[in-house]
Image (cartoon, rainbow, N blue to C red):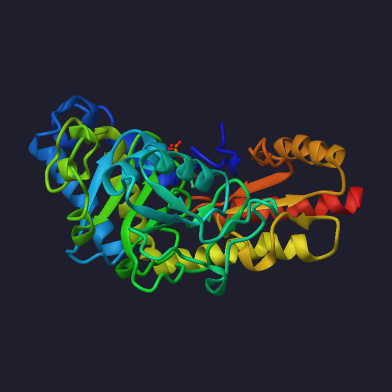
Amino acid sequence: MNRVHNFSAGPAVLPLEVLEKAQQELTNYNNMGRSVMEISHRSTEYTEIDHQAKSRLRDLLDLGTDFEIMFLQGGASSQFMMTPFNFLDENKTADYIDTGRWSAKAIKEAEIFGNVHRPFSSKESGYKRVPKNSELEFSDNPEYVHFTSNNTVAGTQFPTEPETNGVPLVCDASSDLLSRPIDASKYGLIYAGAQKNVGPAGVTIVIIRKDFLDKATTQDVPTILQYQTHAEKIFNTPPTFNAYMVNLVLEWIENKGGLSYFKKFNEEKAALVYDEIDKDDFYRGAVEKDSRSLMNITYRLPSEELEAKFLAEASEHDLYTLKGHRSVGGIRASIYNACPRESVEALVDFMKDFRDKNG
Ligand SMILES: *Cc1c(COP(=O)(O)O)cnc(C)c1O
């Protein structure tokens, strides 16, 4: 069977080259007569995979030597709890920019540990936009400013890092990490579940600036939930196969030309769909134009009946998982790094055709 055009929001499409390489090495990795899944996480071979993946992340994101990188479990959702557990208490405040469903979940967890101030919220208006810097009203002395760089459900994305005047950013980058270059100097901590843009589900990438880590508390924090525990050394068995897959994806990103390549590639792919949406009022973008995501494109049709018809006919054309998140409805095309341009072109051709027949 041929592969379909896969627009899943996550777990999402992986590069075919990566899957084929993993398949090739699956039963006999590096001539060991065993797979990656069947070797010790302390072995020379796994240590090499871990080092390679971390050094590739360091290079691709231009992190320098100031950051620790860790491959943890528990998903981005565990980071909603782990970050405030390490950095907040009842006498401390963190600022959380509220731009969507995932931001709101992060806020709910942070409120268990300390004070949360919202410098901005687009909740009332249905999370249709991200803030401009001039709209951010920070508290007096926040420990950090948390933001969700790409809002997977609504389909909005910060065009660039919010300006915090030196307060370290903590970023949930689950759905756009490695889709474009970042300014690492602004971040205290970046976390991402791998399953959107970087690999399979089961590994959570955490990148933490060393001087920010120094401010973490270890008091009353269970050992495994302390960032300090995972810095510099592998504490317990990591999700080894998942980290191996991430390393293959990182190698693929490097071979393609790194993050500047993907920035352009992703901008071009998104423009194909947004141009089609903006042609007339048959398709309507679900969010404000200057907040549009390059990763998750959300739009509506004139009626829910037409949306249902659109989705049914799309799958007949091998265009899969275009249904919007259950909380917002409509259409969502997730077009992460690994989504080929051909898939986006096939979607746009189908959109044109569907408009001609139903518009
Ligand atoms: C998918 C997603 C999450 C949740 O990730 P899990 O790994 O399932 O916990 C959190 N934040 C964002 C922005 C996401 O897209």
Residue 19 showing in the rendered view: no
Residue 174: where, in percent of width, then height?
A: 44, 48
Q: Is residue 275 above or below residue 49?
A: below
Count up the numbered dots. 0
Residue 348 showing in the rendered view: yes
Residue 274: where, in percent of width, then height?
A: 69, 62
Nearer the observer, 203 or 275: 203
**In the rendered view, does 44 fall on the left or right side of 284?**
left
Residue 97: where, in percent of width, then height?
A: 50, 57
Q: Quadrant of the N terminus?
A: top right
**In the rendered view, does 173 fall on the left or right side of 188?**
right
Residue farthest along the front direction in this orientation: 91
- x 15%, y 38%: residue: 46
Nearer the observer, 138 or 33: 138
Residue 161: where, in percent of width, then height?
A: 44, 67
- x 27%, y 33%: residue: 239
Q: Is residue 24 above or below residue 179?
A: above
Q: Quadrant of residue 140?
A: bottom left
